Each structure stands twice: as structure tokens, then as C-alpha cells.
Amino acid sequence: MLNLDDLDTTLIRLLHEHPRAGHLELSRLAGIARATVTSRLRRMEQAGVITGYGPDLDLEAAGYAVQAFVTLQISQGRLADVQRGLEQIAGVIEAFATTGSSDVVARVVATSHRDLQQTLLLIDTTNGISRSESIVVLSEVIARRLPPLT
């Protein structure tokens, strides 16, 4: 685990606010040398703090007007089987092992309610899943954001 200082958190915040900014622009925004930006970002990448620079997508604009969260109960010891099965379903864009009454929570996107139904049927046939429940997203209340970094 890397201890982030104020400069590291400033660079992360600037990357979040200006995702297309290069090192030169980040150095201007942060008021530091470009070489410092480069070395700090490289250090955070090597430590696994920064894992990528991919684009943020508006799923609806990309054709996925329907989203749902699907809670899964799985058979004892079958998490690896469930993971392999879910990875094969294109509409499953992320999944998390959880505590509580469900073992896994998956985020699913679909082009329509019919497409969602087909994706849910695929999920239900995945080896190791004993029960599922879906919750359709109506709207985004809080967009994905950075946690407070200290």
C-alpha cells in the first residue's frame, strides 16, 4: 500500500477532473515540473493505485438504456465457477463477492427490457448460482466519484 501525500492526491483529483490532460497540462494545473508529474504518476501506477486511463462512458448514450443490479446466492464453494460463467455474459459489466444475504452482486447493462430479460436468464443458468434477484435502475442519483483521499 502506497501512502499518498498531498501532491499525489492533487494529481489524482486533476486526472479525474481533466482525464485527457497530458503530463505537461497536469504540471501546469498543479504548478509543478513535468518530470515530477511523470515520476509521481509512474510511482502510483507501479504501486497499483492508478490502474488505467480508460474513458468514462455514458452507458445510455452508448445504447445501454437499461441497467440492473443482480444479487446472487451461490452454492457453497462455487465462486470460481460463478465468476467464469459471469465473465462469459457480455451484459455483466462488474460483479462483487459480498457479505449478507447474497454472495455476489452483479451490475448488468442491456439495450432494452427484453435484452435484460435474456441476460437474466443467462445468469440464472450459470453453474453454481442457486438464486438471483434483480433490481432495475431508474436513474443515477450520485455519479461514480473519487473517495476522499488523504
Image (cartoon, rainbow, N blue to C red):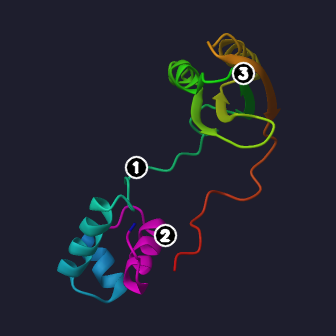
Q: Residues within 10 Å of mark 2 (few under 14, many from 20)?
A: few
Distance CA(mark 3)–CA(mark 2)? 32 Å
How would you rate the neighbour count of disc 1 (Cα within 10 Å): few for under 14, some for 14-19, many for 20 or more?
Answer: few
Viewer-side residue, 122 vs 24: 122
Give the CA distance from mark 2 to mark 1. 14 Å
Q: Residue furthest front?
A: 76
Q: Is residue 140 left or right of residue 39?
A: right
Q: Are marks 3 and 2 in contact (CB under 8 Å)?
A: no
On screen, residue 29 versus residue 124, left or right, reads left
Q: Is residue 77 magenta?
A: no
Q: Position of residue 56 (x, y in %)?
A: 50, 50
Q: Magenta residues, as a range? A: 2-22
At 74% from the left and 31% from the top, the residue drawn is: 70
SS category of the residue bearing label 3: helix
Q: Nearer the viewer, residue 107 or 3?
A: 3
Task: Identify residue for label 1.
Answer: 54
**Residue type (three-letter) at the residue carrying disc 3:** Leu
Give the farthest residue toward the bottom.
31
Q: CA distance from mark 3 to mark 1?
A: 25 Å
Q: Which residue is label 3 attached to? A: 116
Q: Amino acid at mark 1?
A: Gly
Q: Residue at x 68, y 42 (%)?
A: 98
Sequence-first disc among 3 and 1: 1
Residue 106 at x, y = what percent? 66, 34
Mark 2: amino acid: Glu
Query: Is 100 above or below relative to 21?
Result: above
Question: Residue 113 location, x and y as percent?
Answer: 77, 22
Q: What secondary structure is found at the residue carrying circle 1?
A: loop
| First of labels 2, 1 by sequence position | 2
